[in-house]
Amino acid sequence: AQRVTQPEKLLSVFKGAPVELKCNYSYSGSPELFWYVQYSRQRLQLLLRHISRESIKGFTADLNKGETSFHLKKPFAQEEDSAMYYCALSSGNTGKLIFGQGTTLQVKP
Amino acid sequence: ETGVTQSPTHLIKTRGQQVTLRCSSQSGHNTVSWYQQALGQGPQFIFQYYREEENGRGNFPPRFSGLQFPNYSSELNVNALELDDSALYLCASSLAGPESEQYFGPGTRLTVT
């Protein structure tokens, strides 16, 4: 079955601390993986995708096919990073997204 | 370039009624996907439309149906509403293909009483 698992509902860190939001997936083919973010009172938006291998707002994510993981990392958290983060898998030719349950990142001053 | 818009913002319906939610795609996009997001959960794929044809469906009953119009705007219709249909309904537009970024609307909050 195709599935995305985000084991932490809430991750709370202090400003300047490293952040790692975990994401594991189950997929039988070659996955297209994404991180979406939703800031307070804003719509869901793409943060980054594994295919582009870029760093957005200091965040990076590496696809590890052996561990079937796509963890999101940032070396130094900022207060403005506080948001809900969703890991998502693009499935099949339609590109339908399978989302995890989301992790709320809270960065304390 | 205008973003994805949805209407209404929120509405309240009674069990057994029917509802229509609307979505306007971002300019230039030919694909619309609909998602249901229950409280505390991630969005769940309902179906996708590409050039006015259904192009994939999630695990939702037939009382969830949709339309896409020539201008690529879209409707989600839900018949015989149930209490569990209460959720945030998200529309996302994109170009075709699994690698395309999906641009989400602000959502419609549906409450079924």
Image (cartoon, grey):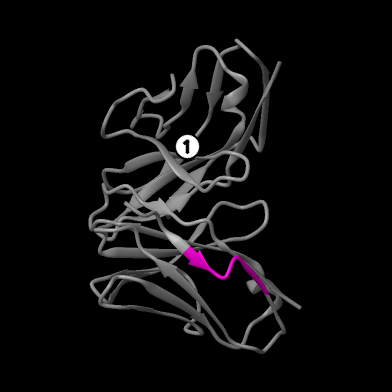
Q: Which residues are magenta?
A: B6-11
- Number of residues whose C-alpha sits closer than 10 Å to that of mark 1, classed few (under 14), some (14–19) or many (20 or more): many
Closer to us: B76 or B105: B105
**Residue B11 or B101: which is nearer the viewer?**
B11
Q: Is residue B74 left or right of residue B39?
A: left
Q: Residue at x 48, y 49 (%)?
A: A99
B87 displayed left or right of B7: right
Residue A41 falls inside the magenta stretch: no
- Expressed as whole percent of the image width and height from the top left, the position of residue A27 reads 36, 47
**Residue type marked 1:** Asn
Task: Give the residue at mark 1.
Answer: A24
Judging from the image, mark 1 belongs to the subunit labelled A
Residue B21 in percent (x, y) is at 51, 75
Query: Which quadrant of the view contains residue B9?
Result: bottom right
Position of the C terminus of chain A by quadrant: top right
Vertical side of A82 occupied by B106: above or below: below
Majority secondary structure of magenta residues? strand
Give the x, y percent position of residue A82. Answer: 62, 29
